[in-house]
């Protein structure tokens, strides 16, 4: 075997017709016989946020005791395989989600607007929006210098809601979690095809339909770069070939699922209208969007993602669970046992889907570990008790190793009404982004280090 000092460039793209395929981290991206080659390929730390709406059935979520000996509750049970990578955080609050004097109702709008900003939103139905820059966008502004995309903002609901969405609040407050400035909400994308094209489409083209026509004529993304892939594979070692094959298989599978969803969208569905190309069930749609996030991290196209599983006050009907009533009305259960049981089923489905994401992150190699090892993932809701619209003692998880900076396996109980913004300030520290304050922060959180 001939060993040279040449290496595959870290930002390698295989280009085809209407496509640019980014590569995951490969051993061949480290020069042979260099000092760096004697070490594992260094990996960046990723930051991800996953949001669920309408609060939680808190006694089915919150462990009874703090510490490492806590018992997993029914809602947390699907996350058992990741217990040692997970911190359950209690006592955190978004005090700026509470109504100011004279504001009255609107807790759902405030809860989504404050979740990543820590800032009380202005009550308005017009264009004079006011919230605060969100933590994901603060991180993206710094990390974008290393990636092609600053961040990805994804959702399962579309942005078709306009006007007023809650007691005098603009729908802009519930259509997104992300704000690039106090007056600029960042739209969230719910179409898998649009996210896929943002990651792999021809960046020189501004016409999505023309790109789709071209792709249909030339075949799939992988077909369009097949010759370059074959040429690259010949120069890789066995470990890199296996890693690349697994990555390409993932892309092929996502392409297939998107195509199936687009074909299914042509069918007539009684009393249900769906945007083109979106899977018919909550679970299939959510998993497809999560797979796209994994690809975005795997290729280092971005290091920041936000995923909204549902818009606040969503009336989605979870028919796959045998539920026939809308989610938001059910969340106002007024202690009705049957309704509580149904909402608990929804809460458990959400954590099951989140567990799917974590498993994909954990099983995807990245440098000297996995994507999960090199990530910090926040999961939770802007309300605790959805029936009472409580903004205190929020349901919050922090999952991932943070590149060796975080040790999971505990339930950490903080003093009541500790600002959730303190967690965000702490995560920025671990990304090497220094800020004195964020939102309504009062300091940093003590988190166990690995």
Image: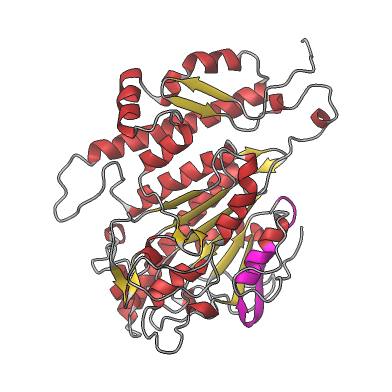
Is residue 419 inside the magenta stretch? Answer: yes
Q: Residue at x 59, y 17 (%)?
A: 233
Q: Nearer the viewer, residue 243 or 293?
A: 293
From which residue to which does the magenta span run? Answer: 403-426
Left or right position of 190 against 246: left
Q: How many marks?
A: 0
Q: Does the magenta segment cover residue 8?
A: no
The quadrant of the picture occupied by the C terminus is bottom right
127 to the left or right of 115 = left
Return the x and y of residue 86 as percentages of the image width and height.
Answer: 63, 61
Location of residue 220 (image quadrant): top left
Q: Residue furthest front?
A: 128
Q: Residue at x 31, y 69 (%)?
A: 327
Point 15% across, 56% down: residue: 271
Residue 55 seen from this side: no
Q: Position of residue 382 (x, y in %)?
A: 48, 71
For the question of whether residue 423 can be seen, the reply is: yes
Toward the viewer: 173 or 272?
173
> Which of 158/187 is in front?
187
Quadrant in the rendering for residue 173: bottom left
Q: Nearer the viewer, residue 407 or 321?
A: 407
Q: Which quadrant would residue 118 be assigned to in this image? A: bottom right
Q: Residue furthest top?
A: 2
């Amino acid at each position: 075997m001939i060993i040279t000092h040449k290496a595959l460039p870290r930002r390698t793209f295989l280009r085809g017709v209407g496509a640019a395929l980014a590569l995951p981290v490969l051993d061949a991206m480290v020069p042979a016989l260099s000092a760096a080659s004697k070490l594992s390929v260094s990996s960046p730390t990723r930051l991800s946020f996953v949001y669920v709406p309408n609060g939680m059935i808190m006694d089915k979520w919150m462990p009874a005791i703090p510490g490492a000996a806590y018992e997993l509750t029914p809602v947390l049970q699907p996350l058992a395989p990741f217990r040692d990578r997970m911190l359950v955080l209690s006592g955190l609050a978004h005090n700026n989600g509470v109504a100011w004097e004279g504001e009255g109702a609107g807790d759902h709008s405030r809860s989504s607007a404050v979740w990543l900003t820590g800032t009380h939103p202005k009550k308005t139905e017009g264009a004079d929006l006011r919230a605060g820059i969100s933590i994901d966008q603060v991180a993206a502004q710094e990390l974008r210098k290393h990636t092609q995309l600053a961040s990805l903002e994804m959702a399962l609901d579309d942005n078709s809601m306009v006007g007023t969405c809650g007691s005098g609040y603009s729908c802009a407050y519930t259509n997104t979690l992300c704000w690039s400035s106090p007056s600029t909400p960042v739209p969230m994308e719910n179409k898998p095809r649009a996210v896929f094209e943002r990651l792999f489409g021809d960046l020189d083209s501004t016409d999505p339909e023309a790109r789709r026509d071209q792709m249909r004529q030339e075949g799939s993304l992988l077909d369009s770069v097949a010759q370059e892939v074959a040429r690259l594979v010949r120069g890789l070692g066995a470990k890199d070939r296996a890693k690349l094959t697994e990555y390409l298989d993932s892309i092929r599978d996502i392409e297939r699922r998107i195509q199936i969803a687009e074909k299914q969208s042509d069918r007539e569905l009684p009393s249900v209208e769906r945007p083109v190309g979106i899977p018919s069930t909550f679970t299939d749609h959510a998993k497809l969007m999560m797979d796209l996030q994994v690809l975005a991290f795997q290729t280092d196209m971005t290091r920041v993602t936000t995923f909204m599983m549902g818009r606040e006050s969503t009336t989605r009907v979870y028919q796959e669970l045998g539920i026939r009533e809308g989610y938001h009305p059910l969340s106002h259960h007024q202690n009705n046992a049957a309704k509580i049981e149904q909402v608990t089923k929804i809460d458990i489905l959400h954590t099951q889907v989140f567990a799917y994401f974590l498993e994909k992150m954990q099983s995807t190699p990245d440098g000297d570990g996995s994507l999960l090892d090199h990530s910090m993932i926040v999961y939770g809701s802007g309300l605790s008790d959805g029936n009472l619209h409580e903004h205190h003692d929020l349901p919050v998880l922090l999952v991932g190793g943070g590149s060796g900076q975080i040790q999971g396996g505990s339930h950490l109980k903080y003093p009541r009404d500790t600002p959730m913004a303190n967690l965000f300030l702490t995560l920025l520290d671990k990304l090497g982004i220094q800020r004195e304050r964020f939102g309504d922060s009062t300091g940093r959180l003590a988190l166990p280090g690995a």
